[in-house]
Amino acid sequence: MIQWKSNDGLPIEGLLYLPKNYKSNNKLPLILNIHGGPAGVYTNGFSASYHIFASLGYASLCPNVRGSEGYGDELLRGNINDIGGGDYWDLMSGVDYVIKQGIADPEKLGVRGWSYGGILGGWTLTKTDRFKAAALGAMVSDWISEYGIGFNFDVRLWYIGGTPWDNPEKYREMSSLSFVKNVKTPVILFHGEQDMTCRIAQSMNYFTYLFEMGKPVRFLRFPREPHGFREPRHQRIRMVEEIAWMQKHIKGIDWKCERPKEEKEEKEKEKQ
């Protein structure tokens, strides 16, 4: 567990995962993770993905930005009508803190996020080009088009305020799609076709804008999957593709995950 101060002096806590035999002042590539919610929280428990990245030589930072639960009402309500504001700076000040501690290499940064993590991650890429790679899933990129087909109650009362017809400029100003031309980071996007919380068109639009501008981007859509992936095969594909994307764009490694011998033999039987 680590703690730092955001740009406005607000104390922010987070979890930092390091490789097993990490030695001080050994600068590592860093993955910034953004939790869902916004009222989610990172807890001090086991999560396989961070250990997988640690085994590949990465540090992983998991900040509990304003809007997170578990720290009282004041922090929980800290991003009311300010989504992508103070919470963005909570992330970036955390990255700066880990760099200042001599742990993270500022030239080898990546970012991951799902749901609100994908929303804030997509927004972050429009604000900074510091990240070499991004893996984002189940995002919302445009609040106006999401209003009638996805979740709107929280957005109207909490995160933006008002309706698209009463407050159109605010909805546009808080949508990453409005500023997607600023994105320079290579992005891989994931979305389930049956996601009823954040609709798949949100990722499709973010992808299409970047693709038509000639920027490095991939989009993987998963049949049958809702907001959180359930099928083990899809969970594996997502993880493998995330790792490969980070390895390629952060470390310059053409990484592949070979399937176990038994799986290869089964596939050969299926072909026959």
Image (tube, rainbow, N blue to C red):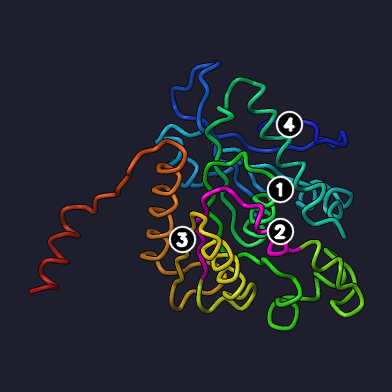
How far, Cα to Cα, is label 3 from label 1? 20 Å
How far, Cα to Cα, is label 2 from label 4? 31 Å
Residue at position x 57%, y 68% from top?
A: 203
How far, Cα to Cα, is label 2 from label 1? 9 Å
Residue designated by label 1: 127
Residue type at tag 3: Arg
Question: What percent of the width, then of the height, locates residue 3?
Answer: 73, 31
Residue designated by label 4: 3
Q: Nearer the viewer, mark 2 or mark 4?
A: 2
Label annotation for residue 179: 2
How far, Cα to Cα, is label 4 from label 3? 34 Å
Local SS, label 2: helix
Residue at position x 45%, y 43% from top?
A: 249
In the image, residue 63 lies in the stretch drawn in magenta: no
Is mark 2 in CB contact (under 8 Å) with mark 3?
A: no
Residue designated by label 3: 218
Q: Which residues are magenta?
A: 175-191
Counting residues from the start of the chain, the first of labels 2 and 1 encountered is 1
Counting residues from the start of the chain, the first of labels 3 and 1 encountered is 1
Counting residues from the start of the chain, the first of labels 4 and 1 encountered is 4
Q: Nearer the viewer, mark 4 or mark 1?
A: 1
Local SS, label 1: helix
